[in-house]
Amino acid sequence: MHLLDQNNQLVDRTWYFIKDTPGVIGFAGTKDKPIPMRQSEVESMLAQMKEREEKVKPKVSFEVGETVKVADGPFQNQNGIVEEIDPERGKLRVSVTIFRSRYARRTGILAGGTRLNRVSRFNVVISL
């Protein structure tokens, strides 16, 4: 499928595809035909996106092997061990024990740092 014809005009079939995609028309132009963005508009939009990416770098203050207590969700108040850290997304994979009996097993959960509290060597919860 070609987007433009020999005269650099939008091919009708392509236009129908774009027109039927929800949310595109209000962003890309009018109901009749899309209008191209000026280079300054594109640069401004890209600069805003880059600025947001730089601002939103989550800080993870835990280390692999550290004992933590889950602060909310289905595993609330259960201790776990940090197994993996994803600093880009600010997420941690924590291993918690479920079924505290002879059928006990460990399962991994993915949690943000704000859902966890640090536990000291003396089993005291330190809220961050």
Image (cartoon, rainbow, N blue to C red):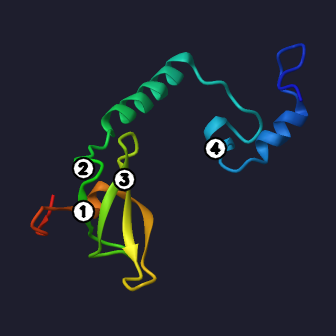
2 or 3: tag closer to the N-terminus: 2
Residue placed under numbered mark 3 in the picture: 83
4 or 2: tag closer to the N-terminus: 4
Q: Residue at x 53, y 23 (%)?
A: 42
In this rendering, the answer to whether 19 lies above or below 95 is above
Q: Is residue 12 left or right of residue 102?
A: right
Give the residue type that dot 3 points to: Glu
Give the residue type that dot 2 points to: Phe
Q: Is residue 118 left or right of residue 106?
A: left
* Residue 76 pos. (x, y %): 31, 75
Q: Crowding near pointer 3: few (<14 within 10 Å), some, many (20+)? A: some
Dot 4 and dot 3 residues touching (CB under 8 Å):
no
In this rendering, the answer to whether 3 lies above or below 61 is above
Residue 62: mark in rendering: 2
Residue 68: mark in rendering: 1
Q: Crowding near pointer 4: few (<14 within 10 Å), some, many (20+)? A: few
**Structural distance between the alpha carbons of marks 2 and 1:** 9 Å
Dot 2 and dot 1 residues touching (CB under 8 Å):
yes
4 or 1: tag closer to the N-terminus: 4
**Structural distance between the alpha carbons of marks 4 and 3:** 45 Å
**Structural distance between the alpha carbons of marks 2 and 3:** 10 Å
Where is the C terminus found, in terms of image quarters?
A: bottom left
Q: Residue at x 24, y 49 (%)?
A: 62
Residue placed under numbered mark 4 in the picture: 26
4 or 3: tag closer to the N-terminus: 4
